[in-house]
Amino acid sequence: MIGRLAVFGATGDLTARFLLPALAALRHAGHVGDGLDLLCAGRQDWSTDQYREWAADRLGPSPSEDADAVVASARYVRCDVTDPDEVAAALAGDGPVAVYLALPPAVFPAAVVALHRAGLPEGSRIVLEKPFGEDLAGAQELNRLLAALVPEQAVFRVDHFLAMSTVQNVLGSRLTNRVLEPLWNGTHIAEIEIVWDETLALEGRAGYYDHVGALKDMIQNHLLQLLCLVAMEPPITLGERDLRDRKVDVLRSVRPLTEEDAVRRTRRARYLPGRIGDRDIPAYADEDGVDPGRGTETFAEVELEIDNWRWSGCVFRLRSGKALGTDRKEVAVHFRSVPHLPFRHGGAAVPNVLRFQLEPEGLSLDLTGTGSGTDAFTPLTLTARMDPPPLPAYARVLLDVLTGDPALSIRGDEAEEAWRVVDPVLSAWRKNLVPLEEYPAGSDGPPAR
């Protein structure tokens, strides 16, 4: 396990909300101890004591002993991550280091160049948050810069969705249950929905979100990763090469979207004023820090098809929206109807839908049964709840970084293939070929077409 962790952007929201609690969880589980050298770097002109006070405040009024220990172990330095001399001074020390860039994606290229010029000890690793680049060309350039810095095996393009136990359950359910695999194809499945709808609105994230939008923030990475796990062929092993090879196969098989396809098969929208529970939500365009002229979407939907033997005839619908009336975070597998119902008075059977609930964790299957007589159909739902995961998602991410296991990180060619899928949509949206619709906050989204 690597002994040094350097977090650049250590005064940001990502570090406060996820990385520091993740380190506390790793300490609690016995994966890290006092031997981990934790360097926290930011642009604020703070002392280490000031940083520790800030971190303790962000961790809440009643932190655990493990959280206290993480805060006490942190060393803070002021550093411009784009300045090679300041980066070299911050990283001075013995042994390899894991460098976590908890920074806006636009800063990644300059930060990687500075790290290259500063020099990293052999065996070091670099961690980047999504999105990886702004488009395909940007991802290719970022990969070129990373390749000059460290080997591909030492690059961790992290997507914490892949570390969620419920997301891993999608793959686990497929590969460990013989009853599913013979049906897991377009012959038996008509449509698969991959949905991340949330009641949360902007929540003060305009500085990031207004430059990204729902398509880049959720679909280009998180939901395409779920698509890979749902649609991939069974890998030989779950080692990093086998698993990531099969994921790339899926992305390469996604049918390219033309401009006409983007008009017919994609939607974008943003929320108007509304009410969610007891909260009054302003229009997205009126949120603090938003530039209405950018036309940033808070709702995105993309319909894809996969050109291979297994998935011929199946539609994959990826959707994500903010400020909606209900949270819906799931993978819903819609099976085709049976070819014949041998009942005297007909009627309609409930379509079979297998749902992997992502948050909260769960699994359900919609079936049809018969009631008091052979002509009465009764909807049945089988449900199961998952045990809480041993580690939160970001703790699993950090553990993989520290131990050097890249299986759940995004490989360079995989990041590029994901942009290949999304780039035609972005192009069509920039040309205003797809109208920017609107929906009231607290609703189900834009009206159905």
Image: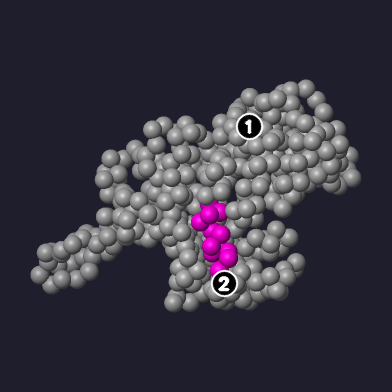
- Residue 398 appears in which quarter of the rendering? top right
Q: In this view, does 3 lie above or below 162?
A: above
Amino acid type indicated by mark 1 = Pro
User: Disc 2 versus disc 1: distance between alpha carbons?
Assistant: 40 Å
**Residue at numbered disc 2:** 269
Residue located 41% across and 32% down the image = 237
Q: Residue 422's x, y, as percent?
A: 54, 58
| Secondary element at tag 1 | loop
Q: Residue 257's x, y, as percent?
A: 47, 62
Label at residue 191: none
**Residue at numbered disc 1:** 151
The image's colouring method is one colour
Magenta stretch containing residue 379, yes or no? no
Amino acid type indicated by mark 2 = Ala
- Residue 186 appears in which quarter of the rendering? bottom left
If the image is split into quadrants, where does the C terminus sit? bottom left
Specify whether 329 is left or right of 287.
left
User: Which residues, given as a range, are shown in magenta?
Assistant: 418-428
Nearer to me, 75 or 86: 86
| Secondary element at tag 2 | strand
